[in-house]
Image: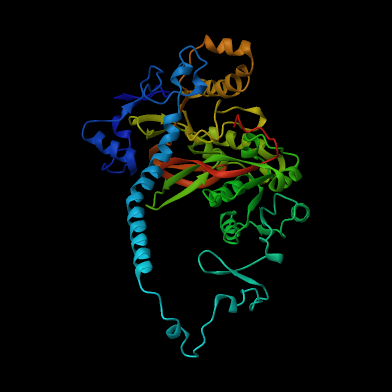
Amino acid sequence: MATASGSGEESPSDDVPTAGASGDAPTSGAAGDAASRGVAGDAPVEDVATGEIPADLNPHPADAIYADGPSTSEIDVSDVAAEGTDAAAGSAKGNAPAEADASAKTGGDASATAEAEPPDPEAAAEPDDVIREPGDVGSDTTDDDSGEARRVGPGGETRPIGSEGERPSPKAALVYNPIKVDADALRDTVTRLAAEAGWSEPLFYETTVDDLGDDVTRQALDEGVDAVLVAGGDGTVRAVSEAMSGSGVPLSIVPSGTGNLLARNLKLPLTEPDAMVRAVFDGDTTSIDVGWTELARPDGTSAEHAFVVMGGIGLDAAMIANTSPQLKKTVGWVAYVDGAARSLTSAKPFRVVYELPGHRLHSARVQSVLFANCGKLPAGLDLIPEASVADGALDIVIFQPKGLFGWLFVWRRVAWDNSFLRRFRAGRRVLSLRTRDNAVVYSRGAGIELAAHDAQPVQLDGDEFGEALSVKTRVEPSALLLVVPKGHTTEDL
């Protein structure tokens, strides 16, 4: 019999998801491979009932303040940040010989052309026997069929030019949820400030039930916009960020909706939408990480989506699913309290196997697993102390409380230890005398792979994403360029 940490109950070993067993959840990647090895005898590491936290996980700064926490010198995530760029660097190095060969071939062709005999002018003048000099042909500045003067780009394509031969004015696009904002007022503000800054008339795109914002954002990028503004809830920000990840085009978040979690974690002005619109034209930019999650569905299909705040599998997703949309519209994020109450009455721990890159496979009975880019929640709750949106890593939180008292430990850790005591010197001294409990386990890494025995609900940035048997997360460091007001502090993000 095997015992799971945080549950205090004995569980049969065949409750662990393994590949090849009848009725077990399919696993993929490193977790799947390790699970397959478990069948051969190298079983996943079972979390013990003594309350110990898996020793081989990356130490997290959230635990450093406790008596049994890691020392500051042991906390170093620079290697984690480097992992995300190794593949890209290796790919670039791998292409170098091919590029060198291409360069050599080009150089050889140019040399051969230079050594060839010059063309015969009289033969080139046929059939009208007129030899034209370069000055005989006027520049191509006449209007074409579209009524615009043309010029030739680097690839030989024709493109419009601005007045007096200057570059066309930059253009912004606004993607907004019409339910969350005053559309007319916001469009007028963006149009007015764009004109004052000398930009072209902006483009406007509304989200719909079928398009949360990612498709229209791609349309805006295809139009060659110089910046994108997004106004809506956390789901709209997530969808637009997914489309803009890696584009190099700056994104400005105009706070709207109920949560505004990314804006809160970036410490952006929440009650001054004009400030975030104006920042597009005279503000600064900063880069943040983007998380990606691949979901394996019970029907065998899979899908990958981005998140910028946090995602999760288990109770947190069930809580969101049980939150009344009408109540959320009326009282905002407080509606999640009602969703939590509905979910806790039927909450049951479920078995997962999970693995962080470079670490062993673990098995545990959990209520929820979070993978986060940000750590702060509304009402001043600090779910993950020391979380950063720009450290090239994801913060992992595993909730495995044991009964009612276990949930009290969870609440104490999040609402009391993290959100209150850590803010004061005296409180930190109290924490330094107390050992951690294993109701909440923190770690940090380039991602996490996990598989569940039964399909579990999944959420990304507060939106439902159905059920999944396994999730595989990864981080893309500095993939999203964000606009912030001029002089806005970004050092502690």
Q: How is the image coloured?
A: rainbow
In this picture, residue 135 sits left or right of residue 50: right
- Residue at image location 52% in from the left, 22% down from the top: 62
Q: Can residue 27 be seen from the camera position used here? A: no
Q: Position of residue 346 (x, y in %)?
A: 51, 35
Query: Which residue appears farthest toward the left when viewing the image?
Result: 40
* Picture layout, residue 188 above or below residue 451: below
Q: Quadrant of the C terminus?
A: top right
Q: Position of residue 311 (x, y in %)?
A: 51, 39
Quadrant of the image occupied by residue 37 = top left
Residue 312 is left or right of residue 328, and the answer is left
Q: Nearer the viewer, residue 396 or 343?
A: 396
State which quadrant residue 195 falls in. bottom right
Q: Which quarter of the rendering shows the N terminus?
A: top left
Q: Quadrant of residue 209?
A: bottom right
Q: Which residue of the protein is positioned furthest toward the bottom in this rendering?
A: 128
Looking at the image, which residue is at 45% across and 85% down?
122
Can residue 232 be seen here?
yes
Q: Position of residue 204 (x, y in %)?
A: 68, 59
Q: Residue 440 in the image: state x and y as whole percent.
A: 48, 24
Position of residue 24 relative to residue 214, above or below, is above
